[in-house]
């Protein structure tokens, strides 16, 4: 931590702009002393002596005695507050000027502007939440769907932390038993303890593997599914995006190569977040700008979870169409046979040999869109997306730590099976124990904590 954790800090916790209410949070040992200097009300009782979790009506007055705004002051005394410190939250009118003036006054009175994520970091440092719960705070804020929100709230409530601590407790017991054997070799306990430890390791491996098997589902719930819309110029990619969004988001013209860059928009299909990516038409071109767009489109074909290849059904398949279809072989893809409202030159039967589901539509009239959405949803679900309650691992950092801990336990099992010195197994089991502790923050390095909280928004 590069700053003083004992400072009294303050920040605006609501987005700047025009709104009915804005809020400023003050946290730290001098929160109420500072508040007494700027908050005026009919009661003369100092804020620190007023009832915890009470709301006080008054005004904020500057050094010259000028009233800045009428406010409500929320008193939340530590340790029963968000940061586990004394917290004073000021709710004022939501205008930019009012919020900025009050925050500037608070800072002049001796508070320090909070760093991004510092309120949540203090909650972690003060033991109110663990690191996994702290990371879930941002997941709640950034949830893209109901399933994502359900999963994030579950993590915030400590569901993942409880599972990790349960496994770590079992590992602690195994380490203790093995170390007894190492410390007292004359007792000849190996024939009794080693098989028992091996069986316990196998049970824990199965638990961890079950978590990893659902990790793809969890990550997709948290981050969403990327569905790239690809095809040759004028196949109707931008029209398809607009039809999904029910608005004219992408420019549509008869001129080939209109889309020069990647356009991303989010939709939710029955609670599933899907990022639709409209890419440039893929073709050979000498136009420098268009060539950059085509290169980016090809990269998205590699990165996407699902590709929708748009084929213009009103003209014969071109070599470029065939190349695009060949490039998505082995990926999850849907062939969107567009322009069903025009004279057909390509039929569904012409495309079945490529091995992908074919959805005939008209992006112009909207015909076939319901069937396409249903097929897209089926492909997403087949890709492993489940409801928010079933997802335990949603964070890439957590997934990697669990994967590494599983590998460490495998090495420990192999050591025991090979009759190697017990110290070898203990080293690997301890590594797994440390890795799992990094999820909750019990064994994490300070630089990792700093990096995690640096991603948070100011005021949280």
Image: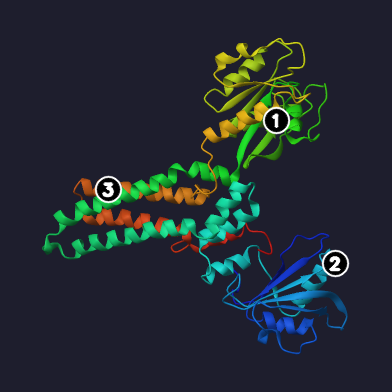
Judged from the image, the secondary structure of the residue bearing numbered disc 3 is helix
Give residue 16's quadrant in the image: bottom right
- Horizontal side of residue 59 vs 194, given as left or right: right
Q: CA distance from mark 2 to mark 3?
A: 64 Å
Instruction: Answer whether residue 118 is visible to the viewer in this image.
Output: yes
Residue 236 placement (x, y as % from top left): 74, 23
For marks 3 and 1 on the same chain, the one whose residue lies earlier in the sequence: 1
Residue 327 lies, with reference to residue 449, above or below; the image says above
Q: Which mark is residue 97?
A: 2
Instruction: Answer whether residue 1 is visible to the viewer in this image.
Output: no
Residue 144 placement (x, y as % from top left): 64, 47
Residue 328 placement (x, y as % from top left): 57, 24
Residue pictured at 62% horizontal, 42% vertical: 271
Q: Which mark is residue 279?
A: 1
Which residue corresponds to mark 3?
413
Residue 82 lies, with reference to residue 324, above or below; the image says below
Judged from the image, the secondary structure of the residue bearing numbered disc 2 is helix
Residue 402 lies, with reference to residue 363, above or below; the image says below
C-beta proximity under 8 Å, tags 2 and 3 = no
């Amino acid at each position: 931590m590069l700053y003083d954790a004992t400072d009294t800090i303050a920040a605006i916790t609501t987005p700047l702009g025009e709104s009915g209410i804005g809020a400023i949070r003050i946290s730290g040992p001098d929160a109420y002393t500072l508040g007494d200097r700027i908050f005026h009300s009919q009661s003369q009782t100092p804020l620190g002596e007023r009832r915890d979790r009470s709301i006080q009506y008054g005004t904020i007055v500057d050094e010259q005695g000028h009233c800045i705004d009428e406010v409500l002051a929320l008193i939340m005394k530590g340790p029963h507050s968000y940061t586990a410190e004394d917290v004073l939250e000021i709710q004022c009118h939501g205008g930019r000027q009012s919020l900025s003036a009050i925050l500037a006054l608070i800072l002049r009175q001796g508070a320090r502007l909070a760093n991004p994520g510092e309120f949540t970091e203090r909650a972690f440092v003060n033991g109110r939440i663990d690191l996994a719960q702290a990371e879930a705070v941002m997941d709640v804020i950034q949830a893209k769907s109901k399933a994502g929100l359900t999963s994030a709230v579950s993590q915030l409530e400590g569901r993942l932390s409880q599972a990790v601590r349960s496994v770590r407790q079992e590992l602690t017991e195994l380490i203790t038993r093995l170390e007894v054997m190492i410390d007292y070799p004359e007792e000849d306990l190996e024939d009794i303890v080693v098989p028992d430890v091996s069986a316990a390791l196998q049970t824990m491996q199965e638990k961890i593997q079950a978590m990893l098997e659902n990790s793809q589902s969890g990550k997709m719930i948290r981050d969403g599914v990327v569905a790239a819309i690809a095809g040759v110029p004028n196949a109707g990619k931008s029209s398809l995006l607009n039809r999904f969004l029910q608005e004219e988001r992408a420019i549509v013209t008869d001129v080939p190569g209109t889309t020069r860059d990647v356009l991303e928009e989010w939709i939710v299909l029955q609670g599933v977040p899907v990022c639709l990516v409209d890419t440039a038409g893929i073709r050979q071109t000498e136009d420098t700008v268009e060539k950059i767009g085509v290169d980016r489109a090809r990269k998205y074909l590699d990165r996407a979870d699902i590709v929708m290849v748009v084929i213009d059904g009103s003209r014969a398949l071109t070599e470029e169409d065939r190349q695009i279809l060949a490039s998505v072989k082995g990926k999850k893809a849907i062939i969107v046979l567009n322009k069903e409202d025009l004279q057909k030159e390509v039929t569904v039967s012409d495309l079945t040999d490529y091995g992908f589901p074919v959805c005939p539509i008209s992006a112009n009239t909207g015909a076939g869109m319901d069937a396409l959405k249903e097929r897209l949803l089926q492909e997403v679900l087949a890709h492993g997306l489940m409801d928010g309650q079933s997802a335990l691992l949603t964070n890439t950092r957590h997934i990697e730590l669990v994967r590494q801990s599983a590998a460490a336990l495998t090495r420990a099992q192999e050591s025991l099976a090979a009759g190697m010195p017990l110290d070898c197994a203990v080293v690997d089991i301890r590594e797994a124990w440390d890795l799992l502790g990094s999820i909750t923050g019990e064994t994490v390095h300070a630089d990792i904590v700093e990096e995690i909280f640096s991603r948070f928004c100011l005021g949280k």
